[in-house]
């Protein structure tokens, strides 16, 4: 595999649900260590696209390639092997309710990767520590806050050593004061070089991380480009119009990225890279 | 009516009647376990299986829900099992005993009902649970075994204890093909002592006690395996 081969590539994905073309010939690819952000109004197909990328929703046509190799979706074995390498974070966490935080992270390590209980436990503890939840390992999902649940979900995905992470509006179901702790974990991941495709409405936060914004509407990719270009004053882009509208609605201004920082628990804070302030000023 | 005579007759009949408890318990345990072993895969098939298999499960469920247990007892005892045990290799292993026929018909009927209990429980789980398991690379079989069923079976306990109490009383029908369980003993002792009313009372009390013990035990189990955060009033 050459340096230039994308980690994950989707070619001409089409998905029709109930007669609606939810995805209309969508293609995208992502290189190692890159962060791409999907934005757009609800119903645009962002969530469907992400779930098509790991076949949770099987696309009606199109191809998916992992490191240049097409995924043979009819082979269940290959599908499972592929999904192990693609981490997925859901809007509503989807933690396994009958398992503690530790067991949530551990279960797939044992069942899918075939690790011993001891090995899997060690790894799970390490991943929980990474998201700042080492002390919550024995708690069950019902006893965790939304932010903590999403961090456990991230730890659970990371434990599988994914090559790419798909994040489907990871903070949309959270109370405002809990968003920050999750964004901090995502920022740390990006800085650690994790390849990510992220659907979000956290425009200023994602502008500071993203190599590329992908604006979707009615099942198509309408615009794509660097956040700086798309959000530049006077860019006249569809993205800019959309983003300024949701910024108005949520009262999100230049400071919103920082509010994330202040909400965190303190494990993994010192991010503050320089690109962020610049991107936010452009909003 | 002389109550002391009735009371004495009841007291004297008690050891004989209690001798039927073993048979009744055997019927219940056998039928519940048969129903569970078949009911879970039937439910899983009905929820996750391919369409032709789902159809077959639906037909199976209709069949066993639609035919009275009494009719099935006769079909199994005088027909199916009598025929099976006449086949070479299947003779002399008790296939034609009344007990086997009773466990088969009670258990198969119960599997139809139990499959619907488990199907409801599986379908009450959020779809995201299976999605998350698949996203981690689990096969559907792994996801069902380690994620779906542990939750669904917990949710099924209240309905399952209901099934236990229904099955317990259905098991009394086994007397018709000659299983010497509580009901059969009640009838025989009532005809020799001419005390049908007091004997019915004794049988009723024994059935009630068995129901109480089983349901109580399942309630204890339900509390013991309750998932953190799921209170008696539902999920928090």
Image (tube, rainbow, N blue to C red):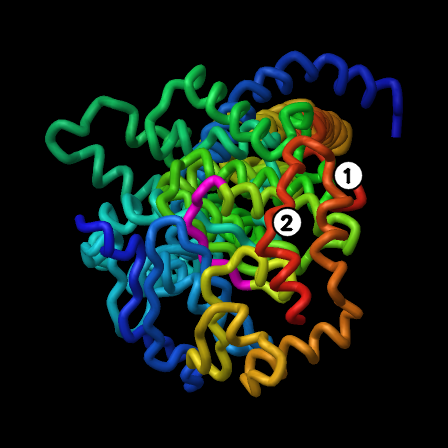
Does residue B18 appear left or right of residue A215 in this picture? right
Report the residue at 51% width, 55% height from top: A167
Q: Which residues are magenta?
A: A192-199
Q: Nearer the viewer, residue B63 or B222?
A: B222
Q: Chain of mark 1?
A: B
Q: Position of residue A164 (x, y in %)?
A: 39, 49
Local secondary structure at mark 2: helix
For label 2, the crowd category at 10 Å Cα-Cα, with few meaning under 14, some 14 to 19 and many 20 or more, is: many
Q: Pointer 1: what residue?
A: B231
Q: Is residue A17 above or below residue B158?
A: below
Q: Tell me which chain the residue with mark 2 is part of.
A: A
Horizontal placement of B158 versus A114: left or right?
right
The image quarter containing residue B151 is top right
The answer to if A217 sits in the magenta stretch is: no
Q: Secondary structure at mark 1?
A: strand
Q: Residue A180, percent across and down?
A: 71, 48
Q: Which residue is mark 2?
A: A183
> Quarter-wise, where is residue A223 in the image?
bottom left
């Amino acid at each position: 595999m050459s340096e230039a081969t994308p980690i994950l590539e989707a070619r001409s994905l089409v998905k029709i649900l109930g007669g609606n073309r939810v995805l209309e010939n969508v293609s995208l690819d992502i290189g190692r260590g890159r962060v791409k952000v999907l934005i757009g109004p609800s119903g645009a197909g962002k969530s469907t696209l992400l779930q098509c990328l790991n076949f949770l929703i099987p696309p009606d046509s199109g191809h998916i390639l992992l490191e240049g190799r097409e995924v043979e979706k009819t082979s269940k074995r290959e599908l499972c092997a592929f999904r192990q390498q693609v981490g997925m974070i859901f809007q509503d966490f989807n933690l396994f309710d009958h398992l503690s935080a530790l067991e949530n992270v551990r279960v797939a390590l044992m069942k899918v990767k075939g690790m011993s209980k001891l090995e899997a436990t060690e790894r799970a503890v390490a991943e929980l520590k990474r998201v700042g939840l080492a002390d919550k390992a024995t708690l069950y999902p019902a006893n965790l806050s939304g932010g903590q649940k999403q961090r456990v979900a991230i730890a659970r995905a990371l434990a599988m050593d994914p090559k790419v992470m798909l994040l489907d509006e990871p903070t949309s179901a959270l109370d405002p004061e809990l968003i920050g702790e999750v964004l901090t974990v995502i920022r740390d991941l990006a800085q650690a070089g994790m390849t990510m495709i992220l659907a979000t409405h956290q425009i200023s936060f994602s502008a500071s991380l993203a190599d590329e914004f992908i604006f979707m509407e009615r099942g198509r990719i309408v615009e794509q480009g660097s956040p700086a270009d798309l959000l530049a004053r006077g860019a006249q882009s569809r993205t800019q119009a959309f983003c300024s509208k949701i910024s108005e609605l949520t009262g999100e201004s230049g400071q919103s990225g920082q509010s994330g920082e202040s909400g965190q628990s303190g494990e993994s804070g010192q991010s503050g890279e320089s690109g962020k302030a610049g991107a936010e000023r452009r909003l | 009516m002389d109550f002391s005579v009735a009371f004495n007759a009841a007291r004297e009949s008690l050891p004989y009647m209690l001798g039927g408890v073993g048979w009744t318990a055997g019927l219940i345990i056998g039928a519940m376990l048969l129903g569970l072993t078949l009911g879970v895969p039937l439910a899983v098939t009905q929820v996750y299986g391919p369409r032709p298999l789902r159809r077959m499960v639906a037909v199976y469920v209709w069949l066993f829900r639609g035919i009275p247990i009494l009719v099935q007892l006769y079909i199994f005892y005088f027909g199916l099992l009598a025929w099976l045990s006449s086949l070479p290799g299947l003779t002399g292993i008790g296939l034609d005993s009344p007990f086997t026929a009773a466990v088969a018909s009670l258990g198969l009927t119960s599997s139809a009902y139990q499959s619907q209990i488990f199907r409801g429980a599986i379908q009450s789980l959020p779809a995201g649970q299976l999605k998350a398991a698949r996203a981690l690379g689990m096969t559907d079989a792994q996801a069902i075994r380690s994620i779906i069923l542990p939750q669904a079976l917990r949710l099924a306990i209240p309905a399952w204890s209901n099934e236990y109490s229904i099955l317990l009383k259905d098991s009394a029908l086994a007397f018709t093909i000659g299983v010497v369980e509580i009901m059969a003993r009640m009838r025989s002792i009532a005809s020799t002592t001419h005390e049908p009313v007091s004997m019915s009372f004794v049988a009723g009390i024994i059935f009630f006690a068995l129901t109480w013990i089983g349901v109580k035990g399942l309630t204890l189990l339900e509390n013991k395996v309750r998932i953190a955060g799921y209170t008696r009033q539902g999920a928090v």
